[in-house]
Image (spheres, rainbow, N blue to C red):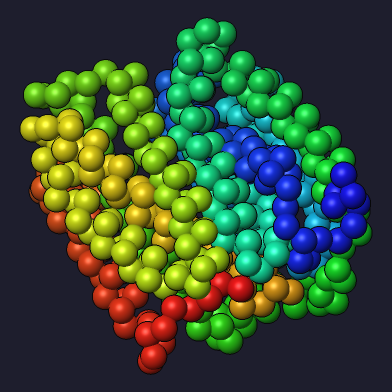
Amino acid sequence: MTSALAPLPTAPFSAPVVLLFAMACGLAVGNVYYAQPLLDAMAHSLDMSPATIGLVISLTQVGYGLGLLFLVPLGDLLNRRRLIVGQTGLSVGALLMVALATDSTWLLLGMALTGLLAVVTQVLVAYAANLAAPGLRGRVVGSVTSGIVLGILLARTVSGTMADLAGWRSVYWLSAGLTLLMALSLWRVLPKVEQPATRHSYGRLIRSLFGLFREEKMLRDRAVLAMLIFAAGTVLWTPLVLPLSAPPLSLSHTEIGLFGLAGAAGALGAARAGRLADRGLGQWTSGLALCLMLVAWWPIAYTQSSLWALLLGVIVFDLGLQAVHVTSQSLIYATRPEAQSRLAAGYMLFYSIGSASGSIGATALYARAGWTGVCLLGAAINGVALLYWLWSLPPRTTPVRAG
């Protein structure tokens, strides 16, 4: 494939290459979420207390946040092919560390490194945006992001099934093998020659990330929207297990896990939103998607009396969330092609802040005000996001093109 051997800043992707990027992103982000349904099994296997086993998720997220700040910007400094393949290869080592862990220290270290290296997903998304032709950037970003959405959703189901069949360690053995194959595939397919990267030193590169917020209004606006929509997302998903497992629904953990697959509709929204962004409709697609997210809280509020209402609400909510997310990436990557990795890092830092804040706020509020209070909080956050989008529109409300 000649496109895999030469720089491709303006050449369109072939479908197989887009699929490979999406699969690589889904596999990498899945490594962050495998542990969620396995905590009890891990605690029993390694004789860890409930308080200690909770650190598995926390340290994975801390590692991911550090990776966003210190690793993702390297995509603007180093050869991206080597960076992506190197991170993917090192992930194999982190996964093996988890699979072979004999005590809590090795498990926690392995999980922290797994989270740190999983940010290769953001390097891949930024790289995909760089390689795609301007008129196809939104479509490519949408397709690759669909892989991330599916990776997150399928990770919990796959890990639970694998653990039942062969124990919790089998999940990480399998992922290590698949990740090694992915590293070899990426080494073979990614371009061997690239456009010159920035000549900044590493320290100056990290400092320039914060300078981008000062210089690029689009990045500021879309980062704030990311913080708000993902805060609303975790307000929905973090405490959802509580009303679903309580009477009158009393669903099992398996049923609750399968219910989360309803969010796969977000993958469809991601792909479609990218195409609309390519047509210059990014801003208005965002506005419509934010309205959908806000309206979705109405059926979601009826969770305890109707699973069908919750199903409808989750589908609409996730469609809206992923549409805003993909549109935002398409718009910010178009602002500074030479700084796309730093743009990704800055944008996703706000995503992480929103996700953590929403999770903490939702669980605290559920204890005080129940599911109704959670839904009011989520709707309020989405309302603020919609108002912020209206305020941030250009003076002349013409569609802002992504390319």
Q: Is 316 positioned to the left or the right of 334 in the image?
A: left
Residue under the point 47% across and 63% down: 276
Q: Is 70 positioned to the left or the right of 163 in the image?
A: right
Can you give x and y, in whole percent of width and height, for residue 38 in the image?
Answer: 47, 23
The answer to whether any part of residue 240 appears in the image is: yes
Can you give x and y, in whole percent of width and height, for residue 47 in the image?
Answer: 50, 18
Quadrant of residue 386 within the rendered picture: bottom left
- Decide: is 387 above or below 360: below
Quadrant of residue 358 within the rendered picture: bottom left
- Decide: is 286 above or below 13: below
Can you give x and y, in whole percent of width and height, for residue 173 in the image?
Answer: 67, 20
Can you give x and y, in whole percent of width and height, for residue 122 in the image?
Answer: 63, 54
Question: Which of the two residues, 17 or 230, is positioned nearer the viewer here?
Answer: 17
Residue under the point 34% across and 34% down: 262
- Decide: is 400 above or below 10: below
The answer to whether any part of residue 21 appears in the image is: no
Give the position of the N terminus as an image quadrant.
top right
Question: Which of the two residues, 345 or 23, is positioned nearer the viewer here?
Answer: 23
Residue under the point 53% across and 45% down: 146
Give the position of the C terminus as an image quadrant.
bottom right
